[in-house]
Image (cartoon, rainbow, N blue to C red):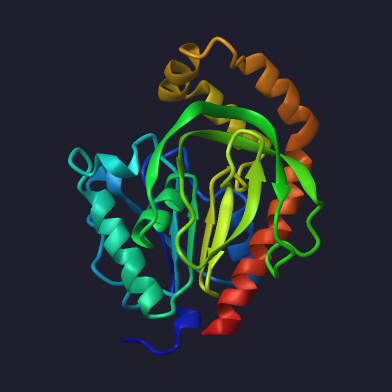
Amino acid sequence: MNKNLSINPWLIIRHVEHEHIGTLSRIFKSTGLMYQYLDVFRGEKVPNALENYAGLIIMGGPMGVYEADRYPFLMDEQCLVQNAVQNNRPVLGICLGSQIIASALGARVYPGHEKEIGWYQVEVTENEEMTVGLPSNFMAFHWHGDTFDLPQGAVRLFRSQRYENQGFCWRANALAIQFHFEVSPEMIDDWLLNEGCCTEISALPNVKPEVIRQQTAEYGKTLEELSMHFFERFINRSNREK
């Protein structure tokens, strides 16, 4: 195993092509760190351990953690999360990725009472290193129908009116974010044109693409700026903990 982890790339697991790391890519570029996508939707196999990777990021997707019978890679990802935290490697999960981390740490993941798609306010619930400098509440972009209980020992970082658990940290190296902190306005526009996304929201009469576009014009740039500070702090803390 390469002991100089700072020169190794981060492994990023992607479940669908359009859910990429977004604003995080700018942090990697500015810090000179590398990353590598592993696309399970292309049939690429999830490794048993991070080995020569510096850290792990798991992105969103349309499947549920409890559907491992249909998507066996979901169990492989949970095993990889467990291996990573046992070996003190940094792990970040967004949306489905946050649910995978929660499940890997022993918490229940289950369908929520209603889908949360669009712009909704989130509240910072803990004044912790990761949330220092964030406003006490801000508008964030959501696209999920599942939720999770907090793993034992986790610290809740965010909540929303619809869902109590919108993000948590576990020890110093695991971070789970339910809402889409990584999106840019351009990404949201791409999602609204994606066939699968269009099919999903067409079944929800209260979700209007034109409203999402209007709100993105109002809130998108602010969320983008907040995310840059947040993710930069995560990457810096990850490098410090090695």
201 or 16: nearer the eye? 201
Which residue is rendered at x = 52% and y = 73% of the image?
Answer: 171
Whether residue 74 is visible here, answered yes or no, is: yes
In the displayed orientation, state which residue is furthest to the front. Answer: 152
Q: Position of residue 4 (x, y in %)?
A: 45, 88
Q: Is residue 216 left or right of residue 32?
A: right
Query: Which quarter of the rendered picture does the N terminus lie within?
Result: bottom left
Point out the residue furthest to the top here: 205
Q: Quadrant of residue 216?
A: top right
Please tell me which residue is depicted at 64% across the width and 46% down the height of the picture: 159
Location of residue 67 with respect to 48 vertically, above or below: above
Q: Is residue 44 visible?
A: no
Query: Residue 237, how many percent across, how many down?
Result: 62, 75
Judged left or right of residue 95, residue 196 is left
Give the residue displayed 51% in from the left and 14% down from the top. Answer: 204
Q: Where residue 190 appears, x then y in whole percent?
A: 55, 29
- Front position in the image: 17 or 58: 58
**Residue 3, horizontal then vertical, whole percent:** 40, 90
